[in-house]
């Protein structure tokens, strides 16, 4: 897999993790007085990024950038 393809996948994974921890922080620290939709927005962003990652991986497979392999040597 080329670095041109690895970098966007790793960036999206990093943003997914950041959004996940951001949602967890908002859920733990918000007391209801602040904007109560911050958790929903953070987790919605995580779902959208996860779909983007899935699309990137499917496109990589379709265009031949990703090659499936088995775990057992042949």
Image (cartoon, grey):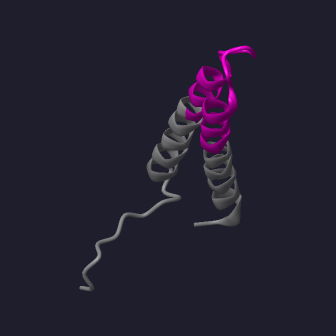
Q: Is residue 59 left or right of residue 70?
A: right
- In the image, 53 versus 33, the foreground residue is 33
Q: Is residue 66 left or right of residue 36?
A: left
List x then y, in percent, for residue 45. 62, 29
Task: State whether residue 4 is above or below residue 73.
Answer: above
**Count of labels shown?**
0
- In the image, 48 versus 40, the foreground residue is 40
2 magenta-colored: no
- Determine the main secondary structure of the stretch shown in magenta: helix
Quadrant where the N terminus lies?
bottom right
Q: Which residues are magenta?
A: 19-46
The residue positioned 53% from the left and 38% from the top of the image is 50
List x then y, in percent, for residue 56. 55, 44
Q: Residue furthest bottom?
A: 73
List x then y, in percent, for residue 64. 48, 56
30 magenta-colored: yes
Task: State whether residue 50 is above or below residue 1.
Answer: above
Q: Is residue 16 left or right of residue 66?
A: right
Quadrant where the C terminus lies?
bottom left
The residue positioned 64% from the left and 22% from the top of the image is 41
Residue 15, quarter of the rendered image: top right
- In the image, 16 versus 69, the foreground residue is 16
Q: Residue furthest right?
A: 34
The residue positioned 73% from the left and 15% from the top of the image is 35
The residue positioned 68% from the left and 45% from the top of the image is 18
Task: State whether residue 44 is above or below residue 50.
Answer: above
Residue 28, quarter of the rendered image: top right
């Amino acid at each position: 897999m080329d670095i041109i393809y690895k970098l966007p996948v790793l960036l999206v994974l990093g943003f997914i993790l950041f959004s996940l921890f951001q949602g967890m922080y908002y859920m733990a620290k918000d007391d209801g007085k602040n904007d109560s939709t911050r958790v929903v927005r953070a987790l919605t962003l995580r779902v959208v990024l996860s779909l983007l990652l899935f699309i990137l991986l499917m496109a990589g497979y379709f265009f031949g950038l990703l090659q499936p392999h088995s775990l057992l040597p042949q």
